[in-house]
Image (spheres, helix red, strand yellow):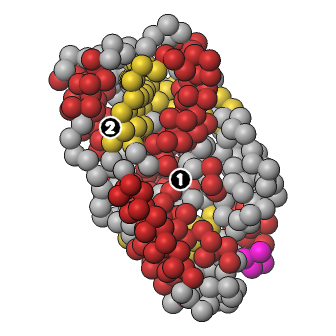
Amino acid sequence: MQTKRQTALSISLVLAAMLAASPLRAQQAPEAKTDSEIRVGNVMPYTGPLAAFATIGRAEAAYFDMINEHGGINGRKVKFISVDDSSSPKTAIEQTRDLVESQDVLLMFGSFGTPSNLAVRKYLNEKNIPQLFVASGDEEWAHPKTFPWTMGWQPTFRAEGRIYANYIQAAYPSRKIAVLWQNDQFGRDLFRGLQEGLGDTAGMIVADLAFDASETAIQNQIGILKGSGADILVFDGAPAIAARAIRAAADLDWHPVFILDNASASIASALRPAGLQNSLGVISTSFLKDAGDASWKNDPQIKAWDAFMDKYYPDGDKDDIYAVFGYAAADTLMQVLRQCGDDLSRENIMRQAASLKDYQSPIALPGIVINTGPKDFRPIKQMRLVQFDGNAWQPIGDVIESAFTPVREDN
């Protein structure tokens, strides 16, 4: 245990030293030239254990291609520069510094993951570079007083955990719960939210096991959790492990109420690899439309989405929720840039990002709106519970306001 602590401390010190080493670190980056283009930086795990999420970056690139073909934003084309960090914070630092100091990006947008974004947050804030719509549900992206250049986008993992707790208390008040969670900040946040939501009934959790994101086998953990006598399994981790967990439970003839975190609720990356028959009845949360849901087949926005995928992302999988995620996140950035008008200073970009009022993304579920303010850096605060019917995700409840996580005093 002491060795693990020392290793973690060493990694933290190395990352801190890398940031401290730059003589330009405390200086504001010069404004990027925007006469003919808007240069947008992005870091994604195109390789490595979380490569399934790279679909987000590919969908965003395709969205910007569509925008550019239609004339761009306020007469300027979007130059989207998306690079790979293999989910390595060290690589994320190197890539982000290159994007800012060599590629002259105006802002960073939608970079993926908690560790990588935490690693570059101080650097970007000290250089006054917008770090907008981070692709992570951590609460660290909503501290406008301490980090005024950093803003999240999706609902928080902790709030999602509370939603599951409320659902379990209402639908299965006397059932035993097992939790299988990824051993990092992502996994801990959702697990903490679940425990907080259960409150005095947290004793319903009879077993929990953690796993590393790099693990490839999960059968032993599933066997142990089955042996706990739990009737409900809450899974919180990446889609590849989610697929193995669903399949392993079926192989063991264990059929708990399976609750799957939103980050892994991809038919393409989790449910289909697990076996659609094994995934029947899985419960999750959503704030975006499921393009495969037949109830949306006549929806004008889903028709536009299908046309977008066919023309700009033909290699993409329409069952992959991460493609929808990337499309919606890019659309939100476009709304901010439209509001900027001819003033594309970094200060105005952040001002407009903090001035979104009841904005309805075309691909968001009905009732899901985006609101921000100078003290509110949590754009999306609502979700819906959904259940997989063997083909698509079906809503099983009303829109739930998820903005009940306590706000820190610096907000």
- Residue at (56% x, 28% y) in the render: 195
Q: Is 82 above or below relative to 357? A: below
Judging by the rendered image, the residue that carries numbered circle 2 is 242
- Residue ID at (36%, 33%): 209
- Is the magenta region chiefly helix, strand or loop? loop
Spot the residue most to the front. 2
Kindly give the residue lying farthest to the bottom in the view shown. Answer: 23
**Upstream in the sequence, badge 1 or badge 2?**
1
Nearest the eye: 230 or 39: 230
* Crowd around label 1: few <14 · some 14–19 · many ≥20 (10 Å): many
Q: Given the image, on which type of amino acid does mark 2 rest? A: Ala
Instruction: Please say whether residue 346 is one of the residues in the magenta stretch.
Output: yes
Label 1 sits on what residue type? Ser
Q: On the picture, is 154 further left or further right than 177?
A: right
Give the extent of the magenta segment.
342-347
Q: Residue at x 20, y 16 (%)?
A: 253
Q: Position of residue 267 (x, y in %)?
A: 35, 38
Which residue position holds label 1? 136
Q: State which quadrant residue 380 falls in.
A: top right
Mark number displayed over residue 57: none
- Which residue, as the protein is rendered here, is positioned at the far left? 251
* Furthest residue in direction top, as rendered: 174
Q: Position of residue 268 (x, y in %)?
A: 32, 42
Image coordinates for residue 74, horizontal then vertical, percent: 69, 74
Cα gap from disc 1 to disc 2, whole angstroms: 18 Å
